[in-house]
Image (tube, rainbow, N blue to C red):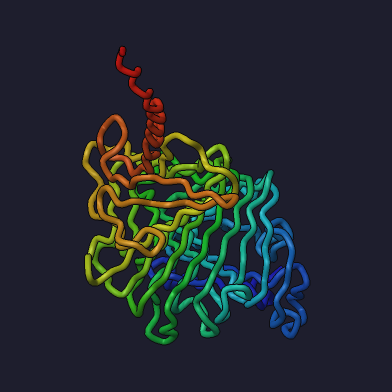
Amino acid sequence: MKLRMLVVIVIITLIAGNGFSATVAQWFGYKADANNPAAGKQPGTGTWKEAMWNKEGIKLPLPGPTITNKDEIKIVRAKSVCTLDSDAGSYLCRLSLAGGSEDANAPRLDIVNGGVLSIGDVRVGAGGTSAQGGIGRINQTGGTLNLADNLLVGCYGTSQKNPNYGKGLYTISGGTIACLAENAKATLYIAGGGAEGASDGTFTIVGNAANISFKQLYIGSDGSNTGCTGTLEYKIGSSGVSPIRVSNSVSIDPLGTSSTAKLIVSATAEPPKGNILLIENQGSTPVSGIFDTVNGNPATEGASVVISSGGKNYNYTLTYKGGAGNNDVILFASSAPAAAPAPAAPNTPAAPAAK
């Protein structure tokens, strides 16, 4: 099968070899038909295994220098859903999800039990990726995402031709996000990255069934680009919530007034009575920066955090200096209220004086 016959596959070997990026594959769902271009214009649903790039004769990654880590697979059609439910293997290129102008209709990747994917950069919501919009979603309930580069949730535009802002939403309630041993970057950016425009990223952790590990974490910006808003959200269950484990460094709101970092915490059940670990900073340096707000209130060191569940309020204190190394982000459970004082003994009337 000749590659030129595949409408949805574009291989540009000349510019790829010179360091420029090229779209090597584009998702339209299992309904896409290489011999019927009109079919490729409709949003589709299906599994990664059914993707065009896994068909006989064009299975990625192609051999030799054809594919580089600057090339990308794109999921850009609004309402498109690709489900990763099997071992997809390893890909040298990056993956970008961006399209549509509404969160609910953004193209989506669902990573479920049994799904395993090793790939370069993953850009969830990338301005410039699609002329139709820059919103993307990943919902992970199981499986494993192995990163050879970075995870960018909400990425700046990468093209002046399509200057959409990038908005990314990543929700994880189970499974694993890990970085390959040879990955020198291994950074989670919650907003930031790219070249043009602004970005907005939300990374949501639900319950305590997920495993999340990176070398570096940036929230609110990549440390150089302005105009970003990064939101880290935790939905705490009765057994707590999965922390983000970072082996090197944590940077929150690195540009101060030129970037925004928000922390949101809520409960899906009665939260634990003990401390709740949010970010485990395994590096030797303290957390750099603080969130602008926690649940809409100032998120300074020692800020009070109230979590409501079942008609009750649970009180915590936010610290960026917790844990054995004094550099973890933790919600410290407030001390139990002191016991109410015992009622005073009733006054005993004085005995009458002897006559």
Of residues 278 and 92, which is closer to you in this image?
278
Q: Position of residue 255 (x, y in %)?
A: 22, 65
Of residues 333 and 263, which is closer to you in this image?
333
**How many tags in the picture?**
0
Rendered view: 328 above or below 56: above
Where, by quadrant of the figure, is residue 258 drawn? bottom left
Of residues 112 and 29, which is closer to you in this image?
112
**Residue 118 visible from this viewpoint:** no
Where, by quadrant of the figure, is residue 256 drawn? bottom left
**Residue 170 visible from this viewpoint:** yes
Q: Position of residue 87 (x, y in %)?
A: 66, 46
Q: Position of residue 120 (x, y in %)?
A: 47, 55
Q: Is residue 219 left or right of residue 172?
A: left
Quadrant where the image shows the N terminus:
bottom right
Q: Residue at x 49, y 67 (%)?
A: 168
Q: Residue furthest top?
A: 354
Q: Residue at x 39, y 45 (%)?
A: 316
Of residues 244 and 216, which is closer to you in this image?
244
Q: Residue at x 70, y 50 (%)?
A: 85
Q: Is residue 355 left or right of residue 277?
A: left
Q: Position of residue 350 (x, y in %)?
A: 33, 21
Rendered view: 318 above or below 62: above
